[in-house]
Image: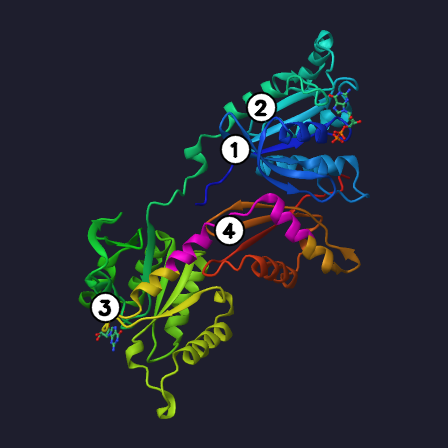
Amino acid sequence: MAVKLPVVVIVGRPNVGKSTIFNRVVGKRIAVVEDNPGITRDRLYSLVTWNKRTFQIVDTGGIVFEELDTMAEQIRIQANIAIDEADVVLFITDTKAGVNPDDVDLANRLRGIKKPVLVMVNKADDPNKDTLANEFYSLGLGEVYPVSGLHGRGVADVLDEIVALLPEEAEMAPDEKEEIRVAIVGRPNVGKSSLVNAFTGEQRMIVSDVAGTTRDAIDTVLEYAGEKFRLVDTAGIRRRGKIQGTVEYYMVDRAQKAIERSDCAMIVIDGHEGLTDGDKRVMKLAHDAGKAVVFAINKWDTKEPPDGEPRKMSLLKKDFLQIVSDQIPELHYAKASFTSATESAGLEPVLDEVMKAVENFNFRISTGQLNRLIQEACFSRPYTSKGKRLKIYYATQVSTRPPSFALFMNDPELFHFSYERYLLNKIRAVYPLGGTPIRLFARESHKHDK
Ligand code: GDP
Ligand code: GDP
């Protein structure tokens, strides 16, 4: 599911032919899998398939730069995007113009980065004049490739080279899921161990105990709905009785380690008792770990209807979620499921929630879609503080697990938490991503080099 596509980033000063080359690469002769119309140009981002490899290509020249931005600032932004996001950088230059000081500036920023940089010397329309391209060896970036974006000459060779330089498929998908790791956590007596027993007693679930990573940790593996669920450190859960009386520290430490090893924390709560301070401590722990989270509100069989009214699960469920969102607002994204370990009820629904949460934990959005979303959000509500406007130039997803986005902006100091929350809400309005936290990183990208 969440396979990260390699990214090729085009950089270069204006008028060297970036958009011409971009259009040629994504154009007729190459199968375009998906096409994202850009904002200022026809296209800024596209998926390209060449020699059976698919990659994303980004034309930084098409990214909106404010009119005020100087050449030095644009170069800095381009370089940051390349450094941050690219697997391969295409550095476009112009053979007719020769080496320009701005080319040198950009080359200085890109030299030494641990990514291949291919220097394409464009406008080499006449093969007899290819030696003119040799001048660009002085940029110190290695091989130079004379090409003509206009006529297409040389472009296929560069594409071959790009594909050869792309990371291996396996490297690109480190989190290719084999199993879903779940840490069952909660304060004592909420029913964690009973839940594990209920899961393992469930007919439809195939169960095996396997060694965990530490000597005394035993994981339990279940199969459900075609997925493997590894319940992390079930020994720690079951052994609890024997170590009763030991300090809470031991429990917390063990729970923390289990969460670290997992994709998703299943926080078990005693539905009969309601939310206690101990529960909140566990919730904070899970939230701080940045993993997917689901609530299992257990002992639901004991839930007495208030004032002898008939049981209204949905109402009670809503009440509970209201309590959670009032008291632990930072976990607003977590979904709740109701379980009864003693009656083996609600077991499949809670695993369904885990599956959804983990899928969202692995969520990936294309650069084009993300930028459109962020730019629309910034446009409909610009943010100014102390007379200075926050400008977000570019956004990119830096990782999954949880989905994390870097925002390149003029001044991270201006990025107030209220605006961060506004953007997060905008993202969740389009992609709800239930069950997973989302992270935003503010990065400075526009420094007045003075
Ligand atoms: P960008 O600003 O770097 O994206 O540059 P453009 O792609 O907009 O191209 C700038 C100008 O150079 C346009 O007039 C293009 O037609 C021209 N151009 C682009 N590639 C070539 C080429 O290979 N040969 C020639 N002769 N002109 C080109
Ligand atoms: P742990 O400390 O979180 O592992 O909790 P246990 O699994 O040891 O359960 C603590 C107590 O709650 C035991 O007496 C269980 O029988 C009881 N219990 C656990 N789950 C349920 C449930 O779903 N309904 C009811 N009524 N009791 C439960």
Q: Which mark is residue 194?
A: 3
Q: Earlier in the sequence, mark 1 or mark 2?
A: 1
Residue 97 visible to an observer of this rendering: yes
Q: From which residue to which does the magenta span run? A: 354-375
Viewer-nearest of discs 3 and 2: 2
Q: Earlier in the sequence, mark 3 or mark 1?
A: 1
Say if the magenta span includes residue 395. Answer: no
Report how far apart the C-alphas of labels 1 and 2 lie in the structure. 11 Å
Q: Amino acid at mark 2?
A: Leu
Q: Residues within 10 Å of mark 3 (few under 14, many from 20)?
A: some
Where is residue 276, by image quadrant?
bottom left
* Disc 2: CA contacts within 10 A as few (<14), some (14-19) or many (>=20): some
Label 4 crowding class (10 Å Cα cut-off): few <14, some 14-19, many 20+? many
Q: Which residue does the numbered mark 1 point to in the structure image?
A: 54
| Frontmost residue, 96 versus 22 | 22
Instruction: Look at 25% across and 49% down and name the residue there.
Output: 212
